[in-house]
Image (cartoon, grey):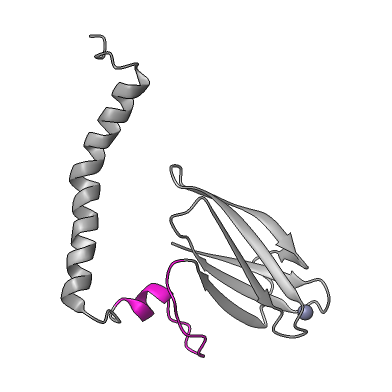
Amino acid sequence: MTLRRLVGCKECDAVTLTRVAIGHSDYQEFAFPCPKCGIEIRFGMTINQESPAVEYTLLKNGEWLANDIPSQFELRFDSENLYSRGAEQMMPFLETVFLAKDVEQSRSRFGRQFSAVRTGWPAIEKMLTHEANGGRSPQR
Ligand SMILES: [Zn+2]
């Protein structure tokens, strides 16, 4: 999921469109030099992974703007994937998905992760519930 939000620089009023990929952590923070004047603009997002819900909880040297204002600049942010700063505005996932050095190893690693999530996690959740109930069986 990618969120788009406009930020205005408090120093020079430059308008930058931020495009942020939502990662798997509860909080992510990004900083960038204003494309026009160079002052650091920093923002943070608190993410509730269960809802899911995102709240912008930090903003330094900028102000959030309404979405109908034209932007002069556009920047992408991703806390989990590396990507180039080139002129192309491809999504970081699409830009990196085929860059694995060893495709078979990468496929195997992701397969193990997905398998663990599908088969292991439900059992772990049951154990956690059992532990939270003080080790007693559920009442019927
Ligand atoms: Zn600026």
Quadrant holding the N terminus: bottom left
Q: How many marks?
A: 0
Residue 128 position in % (x across, y down): 32, 29
Residue, far top: 140
Residues shaded magenta:
80-97
Residue positioned 83% across, 76% down in the render: 11
Residue 114 position in % (x across, y down): 22, 55
Residue positioned 37% across, 80% down in the render: 95
- 126 on left or right of 35: left
Residue positioned 69% across, 56% down in the render: 58
Placement of 90 over or under 62, stated as above or below? below
Q: Viewer-proximal residue, 94 or 131?
A: 131
Residue 124 position in % (x across, y down): 26, 36
- 125 on left or right of 85: left
Quadrant holding the C terminus: top left
The dominant secondary structure in magenta is loop
Residue positioned 69% across, 72% down in the render: 69
| Quarter of the rendered structure image containing ligand 1 | bottom right
Residue 80 occupies which quadrant of the picture?
bottom left
- 86 on left or right of 112: right
Q: Viewer-proximal residue, 119 or 37?
A: 119
* Residue 130 falls inside the magenta stretch: no
Placement of 64 over or under 118, stated as above or below? below
Residue 129 occupies which quadrant of the picture?
top left
Residue, far right: 11
Placement of 121 over or under 134, stated as above or below? below
Residue 107 occupies which quadrant of the picture?
bottom left
Residue 102 position in % (x across, y down): 21, 79
* Residue 82 falls inside the magenta stretch: yes
Q: Viewer-proximal residue, 78 or 75?
A: 78
